[in-house]
Image (cartoon, rainbow, N blue to C red):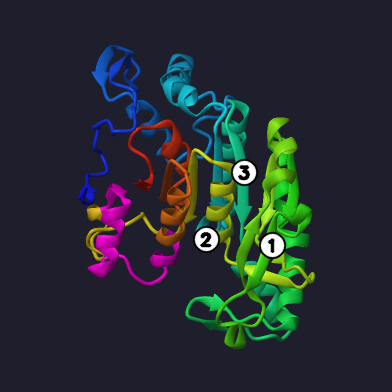
Amino acid sequence: MLAAKVLPLSSSGNSSLGRPPNHYHFHPNLNFKPTTINKSQVITQCLQSPSPSVLDSSDSSIPPQLRVNIYSESLPFIQKFRGKTIVVKYGGAAMKSESLQSSVIRDLVLLSCVGLRIVFVHGGGPEINHWLTRLNIQPNFLNGLRVTDASTMEIVSMVLVGKVNKHLVALINKAGATAVGLSGIDGRLFTARPNPNSAQLGFVGDIATVDPSVLFPLINTNHIPVIASVAADEEGQSYNINADTAAGELAAALGAEKLILLTDVAGILEDKEDIGSLVKEIDIKGVKRMVDEGKIAGGMIPKVSCCVRAIAQGVRTASVIDGRLPHSLLLEILTDQGAGTMITG
């Protein structure tokens, strides 16, 4: 059995998934003397800079030679993922903070521009809570799932499909890509069925089937589908769908290369009290062992479960990454250090 491999965050070891080897590049100091270090170190250092505009060509504080070296260092990773479908689930702190939201949108557009086929799935829990409160409806949860009566379902649909979805589409379009907003109802993308606990949860649904055919013309013409996690059953009744679950099932149906869940935690920790115990890479057996040992618990269980299910259905890797970290998407895809935990088959 391959157990969890705990590496320090500064680890420079190449993974077993064909990460590019070290080579010469210019070190990010002003004398530009060549040095041999990890291939992604210069990218990682720049992406982790506190300046949100570190890759912005309008930032004249970055020497031109350093800027082009950053792009050059990214080439092997771009070649690896170019033309591949990447499903990104967006939520949590990265959705609530305007600066983090800007970082995520810019990262998506950059990845799309260099040839990755991005599919963006979102929830919107805080925004739903805000509007429920404004309408004097008390948000109610059971085992981490929103209790969704008819009135709440109406608000969920209006907020996710009519407000959050279109806001994200507008941000992506403004940043230079072309996004198209959809929900799981459109094109019968998702067909829902009631959750087994529907008597207590109301209109909370599971995904019965996925038909991604409506997405192929968009993906093939370099559009970014932005998908709200609402679906309907065969009778047309709308259901609130967990966005992590929606992203995982969609990644499997699309045959995606990678599923990425943006979260409010660093990733899977060997010791929940020690952020330094981040598990950088783990296989399905290791995940199951950590669940059995209680090291993966609470809200992390449904996240890793949807990752495991996606991998079992053909997705190559799934990553739970820290959405609170600026440019975490680029760190995960364009470096060999990543930004969280990668789960493999």
Magenta residues (range): 278-303
Q: Is residue 140 magenta?
A: no
Above or below, 334 against 209 in this view is above
Mark toward the start of the polypeptide (2 vs 3) = 2
Of pointers 2 and 1, the one earlier in the residue sequence: 2
Residue 297 within the magenta-colored segment of the rendering? yes
Residue type at numbered disc 3: Val
Structural distance between the alpha carbons of marks 1 and 3? 18 Å
- Residue 250 appears at what percent x and percent y? 59, 51
Choose mark 2 or mark 3, whichever is in front: 3
Reading the image, the residue beneath label 3 is 119
Q: Which mark is residue 92?
A: 2
Q: Residues within 10 Å of mark 2 (few under 14, many from 20)?
A: many
Residue 17: % across, % down: 34, 32
Q: How many marks?
A: 3
The quadrant where residue 210 appears? bottom right
Across and down, in percent, residue 119 comes to 62, 43
Q: For the residue labelled by badge 2, is the local secondary structure a helix, a strand or a loop?
A: loop
Q: What residue is shown with label 1?
A: 191
* 210 horizontally vs 78: left or right: right
User: SS for tag 3?
Assistant: strand
Q: Which one is closest to the eye, mark 2 or mark 1?
A: 1
Q: Which one is closest to the eye, mark 1 or mark 3?
A: 1
Instruction: Please say whether residue 159 is visible from this viewpoint.
Output: yes
**Earlier along the polypeptide chain: callout 1 or callout 3?**
3
Amino acid of disc 1: Thr
Q: Mark 2–mark 3 contact, CB under 8 Å? A: no
Res 147 quadrant in image: bottom right
Residue type, mark 2 in image = Gly
Q: Residue at x 41, y 20 (%)?
A: 73
Identity of the residue drawn at 27% across and 43% down: 9
Q: Residue at x 49, y 29 (%)?
A: 81
